[in-house]
Amino acid sequence: MTRRLLIIGYGRMGKLVDQLSGSYGFEVAGRLDIDNNRGGAGITADQVRDVDVAIDFSTADAVPDNLPRLARQGVNLVVGTTGWQEREADMRKVADEGRIGVVAAANFSLGVNLFLALTERAAELFAPREEFGAWVHEIHHAAKIDAPSGTALAMRAAMEQHGYSSAIDMASTRAGSAPGTHTVGFDGPVETIALTHTTRDRATFARGALEAARWLHGRRGWFSMRDVLGLHP
């Protein structure tokens, strides 16, 4: 069954979603970017007619414009943009009132989401070990605006939620064309333990977003990639 997809944000990620959409059973119904969707103006009843789901890889400032307009039209949404999380409570309320489904994630990579699960377990193991200090370091391409990355912030939050109460040093590097590398480490008096995830191809994010869009069909509520991948205990 072919479903109709609206792509919001037509930079590198939006174009990858476009290229891969057919292999996930989607027909692209429209492509919106800064030229035709300033302030969410491109999300009209005509534009979203018969659209099953939208994938937003635009900008942090655009998400609070796009999501309410999609909610008013009853269109489910996958949000791949980061940097807007301070507005999440408002957006959750809008999605709930609009009775739409939303998958919002800092990172849509399968490997990263498994990595986050490992990070949670590591936090539980190291929480009682006061002799170990912890850090999170992430590297992304020079054009990435937000720092720390949404994934790095999610890693820190996961550690804190799983009992790690000591300080967690955060560091970011922006250089070259790196798609993304994240490391969580624990350093003790005579030894160091580090877990690292490295992305080799940005297509992993587009594939994850498309998988989430396919999973979201017919669902209502606010979800994460953990829901999509069934990673909850």
Image (spheres, rainbow, N blue to C red):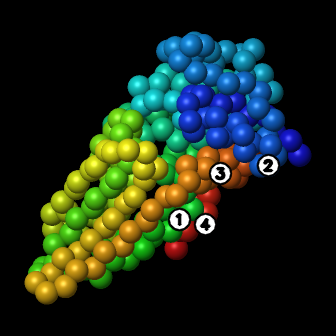
Residue 232 lies, with reference to residue 77, above or below; the image says below
Which secondary structure lies at badge 2? Answer: helix
**Mark 4 to mark 2 CA distance (whole Å):** 22 Å
Q: Nearer the viewer, residue 120 or 18?
A: 18
Residue 215 lies, with reference to residue 22, above or below; the image says below
Residue 40 lies, with reference to residue 85, above or below; the image says above
**Mark 3 to mark 1 CA distance (whole Å):** 12 Å
Q: Which residue is mark 4?
A: 230
**Label 2 is placed on what type of residue?**
Ser
Q: Which residue is mark 3?
A: 207
Residue at the image position 46 percent from the left and 29 percent from the top: 59
Mark earlier in primary sequence (3, 1):
1
Residue farthest along the front direction in this orientation:
176
Q: Are marks 4 and 1 in contact (CB under 8 Å)?
A: no
Mark earlier in primary sequence (4, 2):
2
Within 10 Å of disc 4 (Cα), the crowding (few <14, some 14-19, many 20+) is few
Q: Are marks 1 and 2 in contact (CB under 8 Å)?
A: no
**Mark 3 to mark 2 CA distance (whole Å):** 10 Å
Position of 120 compared to 32: left or right? left
Mark earlier in primary sequence (3, 2):
2
Point out which mark residue 23 bears. 2
Q: Picture quarter containing residue 35?
A: top right
Mark earlier in primary sequence (4, 1):
1
Residue at the image position 61 percent from the left and 63 percent from the top: 229
**Mark 3 to mark 4 CA distance (whole Å):** 17 Å
Point out which mark residue 111 bears. 1
Q: Residue 89: where, in percent of width, then height?
A: 40, 38
